[in-house]
Image: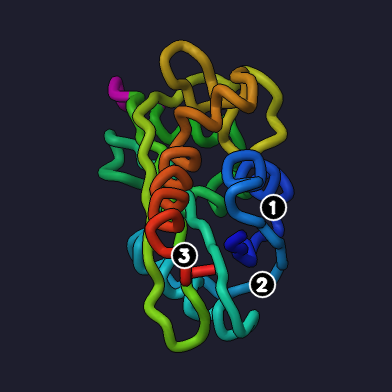
Amino acid sequence: MPHVNFITGNANKLREVKAILEPAIEVRSQSFDIDEVQGTVEEVTISKCRKAAELVNGPVLVEDTSLCYNALGGLPGPYIKWFMTTIGHQGLNNLLAAYEDKSAEAVCTFGYCAGPGHEPILFQGRCPGKIVLPRGPPDFGWDAVFEYEGQTFAEMPKTEKNKISHRGKALEKLQAWFKDQPEAS
């Protein structure tokens, strides 16, 4: 069975990734503080992936999530973690207070690297939605303010969210790639 070392300190992300990938792909977890470059979500993910492969000296999986507000030209984008930490759910809503357009897109980019010296491969999933006042448990990032077809991610059962979310879509692409790459394990 193929395996990956998923580099994350976020227990919620780890739980979702394991729920989607296992048992087809064994997910091992390691937590490292990796400096993130500024740039597009793709540039951030590739940089993190290369650094993680060197630290682990083996196959790694890294993830970067963006929340892109259409009214703000894609911001906060890959910096959503820092926005969420700094201004919280209410602040995320306040960013759009002056705009009628509350639409947004959740973007998840996974980077897989077979080890040091190998080129990272990216798998990206996207989910359209809109920003709403917080609903549901506030325990997983911005899930409580991102609504998809009438429910926030926080209100959805985890299995339903995993089927339609940006993360679920990106991991589907990763799984399909692994099926065609048996030597990637």
In the picture of the structure, the residue carrying the numbered disc 1 is 10
Q: Earlier in the sequence, mark 3 or mark 1?
A: 1
Position of 179 with respect to 153 (left or right) is left
Relative height, residue 56 to residue 159 (above, below):
below
Magenta stretch: helix, strand or loop mostly: loop
Q: Is residue 7 above or below residue 162?
A: below
Location of residue 117 with respect to 88 vertically, above or below: below
Residue 84, x across and y down, in percent: 58, 44
Task: Kindly indicate the quadrant of the structure image that contains residue 153.
Answer: top right
| SS for callout 1 | loop
Q: Image quadrant of residue 127?
A: top left
Q: Which residue corresponds to mark 2?
A: 33
Q: Amino acid at mark 1?
A: Asn
Please provide percent x and percent y for residue 45: 44, 65
Q: Residues within 10 Å of mark 1 (few under 14, many from 20)?
A: few
Task: Give the side of residue 113 with respect to residue 5, left or right.
Answer: left
Labels 3 and 2: the sequence-earlier one: 2
Find the magenta span and give its range.
97-101
> Whole-Å distance between the Cαs marked 3 and 1?
28 Å
